[in-house]
Amino acid sequence: APTSRLPPGTVADSIVVDTSRHELSLFRGGELLRTYRVSLGRSGPKQREGDRRTPRGRYVIDHHKADSHFHRALHISYPNTADRARARAAGVSPGGAIMIHGLRNGMGWLGRFHRFADWTLGCIAVTNAEIKEIWNAVPDGTSIEVH
């Protein structure tokens, strides 16, 4: 179903991803701005590099990545200190390159149909139109909580 768009110039100060509901929500000063349906990696929290799972925890958007294999991407600061400690204790690499991104370049025609399966390698995926909106509304340094 169609959803309303964010007004131009809207700036979010936090992101919450509810993995059980497959939702990414943007907030400003505690006020909900907009919620997006997302595809994720495999179920369960990320434990190590290559497990194809989406991490859980508190992070920040540390940079916008225009040269992605996907239609725009916002890089998430995974792994954090706790992620690195957990991986070190298990004797594995925590991995990295976790992002909020659009669809793979050339696959934008899939649109909302991408949501029928969790297909990412641990990232959080939205449609190309949605990543454009999120890209414009989310500055570097924005906090993101994934639970």
Image (cartoon, rainbow, N blue to C red):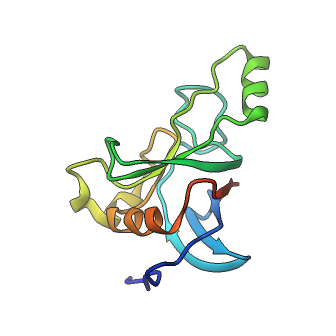
Residue displayed at 63% across by 38% down: 78
Residue displayed at 41% across by 62% down: 131
The reply, left or right, for residue 105 in relation to residue 19 is left
Q: Nearer the viewer, residue 75 or 145?
A: 75
The reply, left or right, for residue 146 in relation to residue 52 is right
Q: Nearer the viewer, residue 86 or 77?
A: 77
Q: Would you identify the image quadrant in which residue 29 lies?
A: bottom right
Residue displayed at 47% across by 81% down: 6
User: Where residue 67 appears, x then y in whole percent?
Assistant: 33, 42
User: Where residue 93 appears, x then y in whole percent?
Assistant: 63, 20
User: Where residue 68 appears, x then y in whole percent?
Assistant: 35, 42
Quarter of the picture containing the C terminus is bottom right
Q: From what the image shows, is residue 83 above or below residue 11?
A: above
Quarter of the picture containing the N terminus is bottom left
User: Where residue 127 appears, x then y in whole percent?
Assistant: 36, 63
Q: From what the image shows, is residue 1 above or below residue 79?
A: below
Q: Would you identify the image quadrant in which residue 112 lies?
A: bottom left
The reply, left or right, for residue 111 in relation to residue 59 is left
